[in-house]
Amino acid sequence: TDYSSRRVANMRRSLFFGWYVLAGAFAILFFVQGARSVFGVLFKPIISDLGWSRSEVSAVVFLNMTIFALALTAVGRFYDRYGARRVVLIATLFLAAGHAGIALVESLWQFVLLYGIVVAIGFGGTSIPLFAALATKWFHRHRGLAVSLALAGGCLGQYLLVPVTTFLMITLGWRWVFVLIGLAILIVNLVVTLLTIRDDPAVMGLEPLGAQAARLQSGVTISAEPDRTLS
């Protein structure tokens, strides 16, 4: 009994796990959204090296955006059915395989398949709406702050990874940049998802932050209302 009491007390004093979920979402979006933004840096080197026209590569980028938009619809259904954790893990495999495979492309059809389709599906499975929905499950109080903190990772990734990618491209070449992006996403996403991403606080025997206080406040409000029934 004493051990159980101490354990409960320690759990109450420990940091709410939802903050770890937010940190994980921040880290994943940092690399994923950063990877989406760096393609502009790699656009000209790809054209110059492979001899494709700007219109051909632009068409693949357009296909990527179209598949990404379509994937969001499917991702929402998979999220409701299987949870964020499984969706992110599967999408990570698409992203890692797609980026690493681009480093080996020689033909346009290969680029269409890998960047236009495979990578686009991966982006859809690690998109901002998914993590926003996940954050709202963990927070009743400070919900707006929680969502903003999680999504800030994507903004920071776009800001910081572009200059890093530019340096790596000049130093190593665009093919190695895609390899490194794929490895970074694979390692970070897998580790972070397995350690921090949980689909629902109920799985851990928890409630969303602030849910209990809101429930108690609602009960007080209801009990404080006068009885207007006719006797």
Image (cartoon, rainbow, N blue to C red):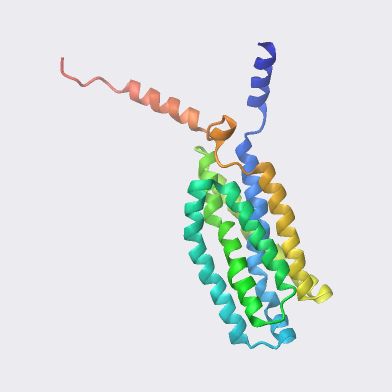
In the displayed structure, 214 sits above or below 63; it is: above
Residue reaching furthest to the right: 171
In the displayed structure, 18 sits above or below 98; it is: above
| The quadrant where residue 125 appears | bottom right
For the point 74% across and 59% down, the residue is 184
| The quadrant where residue 222 appears | top left
- Judge whether residue 142 can be spotted in this image: no
Residue 32 picture location, percent across and down:
65, 60
- Judge whether residue 154 can be spotted in this image: yes
Q: What quarter of the picture does the C terminus occupy?
A: top left
Residue 121 picture location, percent across and down:
57, 63
Residue 199 picture location, percent across and down:
56, 42
91 displayed left or right of 216: right
For the point 54% across and 66% down, the residue is 68
Residue 174 picture location, percent across and down:
76, 75
Residue reaching furthest to the top: 1
| The quadrant where residue 158 appears | bottom right
Q: What quarter of the picture does the N terminus occupy?
A: top right
Camera-nearest residue between 174 and 77: 77
In the displayed structure, 162 sits above or below 58; it is: above
**Numbered marks: total:** 0
For the point 48% across and 48% down, the residue is 80
